Image (cartoon, grey):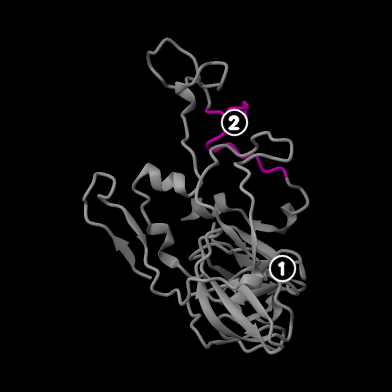
């Protein structure tokens, strides 16, 4: 997918780029697989802001994705569509029973392509198989953490993981972050690379474009009052924090590790920090 550049007619247009929609085959989603989505501006059920810098933006409709394609499904790709709720493209597929599904589109998906799922599916890109049936060294995406629950990992645009080894009931997978993690061999994954690979190279360019995405401005802590942020306050002189950087709620940040999950710690063979140090 190439990147579309603009002529520098204004300062914000200089350097601005956007997605090229040439791979998208239809502009209209399937009505039965779409539902309305209420904008909550980062607020929870009590009305309190739990995610900052959210609000406004263009109205979206949510596409009902099938991240848990049942075994034995044989489907045909009918359309490649844009989804405003994710960075990746989605594919509308029709199975052998005449039912429609939305799944993540990978780099090899085109109209008319046949897709299979299950342990006996062919070892080809876009097909979904248990990790135990996928050859070591393959690139995979949309990986299940718990078998039968549906894909939860490696789903964003251009993402891919690699199946490194199989030992007993577990398979070792190197994730996009560099972390090597163990998964049950019954967990399924799709072969290939998530589509829309050039997504990471898009330059937003202007503040207005960011607002239309539903993102509000971010204010630095050092320019706030002392009551509003641990970095705030001062007499207008130097703005260095003078102490370890913290979040607005006092938690150490920027390099301070906050992972406390003990239940999955045993599944991590090599964490992403170790992988970066060895590079």
User: Is 169 situated above or below 235?
Assistant: below
Of tags 2 and 1, the one toward the viewer is 1
- Residue 183 position by quadrant: bottom right
Relative image position of residue 190 (x, y in whole percent): 61, 76
> Viewer-proximal residue, 242 or 83?
83
**Element on which disc 1 rests:** loop
User: Is 101 situated above or below 84?
Assistant: below
Using a 10 Å C-alpha cutoff, classify the residue at mark 1 as few (fewer than 14 neighbours), some (14 to 19) or many (20 or more).
some
Question: How many numbered marks have been drawn onto this rendered protein structure?
Answer: 2
Magenta span? 245-260
Q: Report the residue marked by disc 1.
A: 150
User: Image check: 251 left or right of 235?
Assistant: right
Q: Report the residue marked by disc 2.
A: 252
User: Is 230 situated above or below 55?
Assistant: above
Relative image position of residue 88 (x, y in whole percent): 51, 65
> Viewer-proximal residue, 29 or 121?
29
Q: Distance between the residues labelled 2 and 1?
A: 34 Å
Residue at 52% in and 43% down: 56
**SS majority, magenta:** loop
Q: Quadrant of the N terminus?
A: bottom left
Relative image position of residue 72 (x, y in whole percent): 73, 86
Residue at 63% in and 89% down: 122
Relative image position of residue 69 (x, y in whole percent): 70, 76
User: Image check: 135 left or right of 184?
Assistant: left
> Viewer-proximal residue, 52 or 45?
45
Q: Mark number for residue 279?
A: none
Residue 144 seen in this snapshot: yes
């Amino acid at each position: 997918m190439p990147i579309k550049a603009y002529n520098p007619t204004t300062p914000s247009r200089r350097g601005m780029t956007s997605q090229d929609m040439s791979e998208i085959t239809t502009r209209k989603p399937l009505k039965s697989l779409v539902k309305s989505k209420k904008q909550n501006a980062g607020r929870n059920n009590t009305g309190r802001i739990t995610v900052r810098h959210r609000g406004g933006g263009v109205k979206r409709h949510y596409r009902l994705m099938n991240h848990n394609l049942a075994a034995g499904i044989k489907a045909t790709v009918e359309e490649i569509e844009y989804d405003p709720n994710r960075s990746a493209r989605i594919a509308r597929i029709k199975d052998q029973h005449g039912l429609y599904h939305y799944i993540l589109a990978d780099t090899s998906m085109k109209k008319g392509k046949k897709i299979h799922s299950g342990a006996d599916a062919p070892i080809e890109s876009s097909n979904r198989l248990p990790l135990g049936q996928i050859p070591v060294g393959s690139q995979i995406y949309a990986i299940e953490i718990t078998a039968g629950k549906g894909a939860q990992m490696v789903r964003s645009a251009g993402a891919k993981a690699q199946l490194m080894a199989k030992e007993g009931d577990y398979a070792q997978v190197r994730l996009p972050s560099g972390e090597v993690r163990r998964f049950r061999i019954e967990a399924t994954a799709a072969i290939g690379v998530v589509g829309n690979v050039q997504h990471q190279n898009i330059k937003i360019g202007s503040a207005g474009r960011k607002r239309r995405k539903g993102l509000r401005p971010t204010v630095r802590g050092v320019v706030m009052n002392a009551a509003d942020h641990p970095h705030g306050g001062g007499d207008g002189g130097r703005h260095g924090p003078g102490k370890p950087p913290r979040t607005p709620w006092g938690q150490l940040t920027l390099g301070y590790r906050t992972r406390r999950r003990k239940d999955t710690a045993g599944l991590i063979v090599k964490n992403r920090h170790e992988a970066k140090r060895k590079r």
